[in-house]
Image: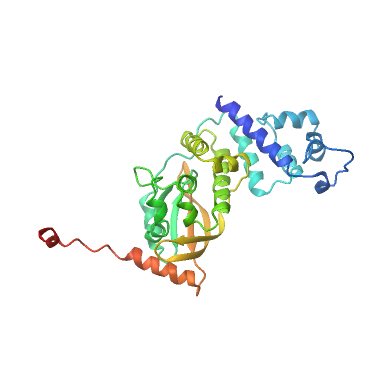
Amino acid sequence: MDDRSDHRTEIRDFLASRRAKITPEQVGLPTSGRRRVSGLRREEVAVLAGVSTEWYTRLEKGHISGVSEDVLAAVAQALQLDEDERTYLFDLARAARPARRTSRRRDVEAPPRIQWLLDSITMSAAFVRNGRLDVVATNPLARALHAPMFDSPTTDKRGRANFARYHFLDAGSQDFFVDWDSGAAATVALLRAEAGREPHDRALRELIGELSTLSADFRTLWAAHDVRIRHEGIKRLQHPEVGPLELTYQSLDLPVSQRAVHDLSLYTAEPGSTSEDHLKLLASLAATPAPAADPTDQLR
């Protein structure tokens, strides 16, 4: 199957999955008799979007190239897409244009100025990740906070950790992430959004293929076609050194070059909380250098 066919399949499955989530009652359409589908029919979406059934059917079959933004916006409104889903639909449309055949987001390392920025942040765990969820730079606290992930066999030969690989391919992640199920869903939704932005990213496609082959949980969540772009909320961890942590996290776009935009993520604790005490302890442990080996030990 070529890239174009894969892309049409993605558009078809995404639109069909969103259509299946909406009932006629939710959009004010009358219902009568038995229905063979739980959600909206194609002709009902067409009516809501103000297009012909034939046209919408063609769109749902993946023929999205050349569709105007106004029409896409009407379809997004008809399907009650949230902001992230709407962005994803527009990304799919842009990726279908013939002129766009290469990935913008290349495997770009974080420049020294970014590492200096991270190192200056001492009371929050701060790290930079790319769209494939590779961690490309951290401050000491972030590395200490995610020590189970960095110590995992899923970390590559360069020592680069990947949230998705750790989440789905290391059973220890279920002990580390207290809310493993919701974290797994968010992880897959982030990868789905990146796949919409960068459908020609070979490394991303290989990662998705690897996870689909090795993890039944990933396959199930990937088939749901859920999308997440903005990453923020509460993260609960069971850290092997300092115990339970409940942290607030926020991600921000971080341009690292003209051809790559990564995410800067910050994890911090509520002031005065037990989690803040635990995070301060972890920061102290991370800042304390390991004791140097005593050369006389080799003579004993």
Is 87 placed above or below 295 here? Answer: above
Q: From what the image shows, is residue 195 above or below residue 25?
A: above
**Residue sitting nearer the eye, 255 or 175:** 175
- Image-quadrant location for residue 18: top right
The quarter of the picture where the C terminus appears is bottom left
Residue 73 in picture, x, y percent from top left:
72, 42
Residue name at image x 27 percent, y 62 percent: 290
Which quadrant would the N terminus be assigned to in this image? top right
Near-viewer residue (279 or 80): 279
Outermost residue to the top: 1
Residue pushed farthest bottom?
A: 272
At x 54%, y 53%, the residue is: 180
Q: Position of residue 120 (x, y in %)?
A: 38, 62
Left or right of 248: which side holds 32? right
Most extreme residue toward the left, as rendered? 299
> Does any portion of residue 98 appear in the rendered image?
no
Q: Using the image, determine if residue 274 lies above or below residue 174.
A: below
The spot of residue 142 in percent (x, y) is 41, 58
Q: Is residue 281 left or right of residue 62?
A: left
Q: Quadrant of residue 53?
A: top right
**Residue at the image point whose x is 67% and y is 31% from the top:** 64
Along the line of sight, the residue nearer the viewer: 2 or 118 = 2
Q: Can residue 219 be seen in this view?
A: yes
| Model colouring | rainbow
Note whether 208 is above or below 281 in the view shown.
above
Q: Is residue 9 left or right of residue 27?
A: left
Total residue callouts: 0
Find residue 33 and report its horizontal and vertical position in percent: 89, 38
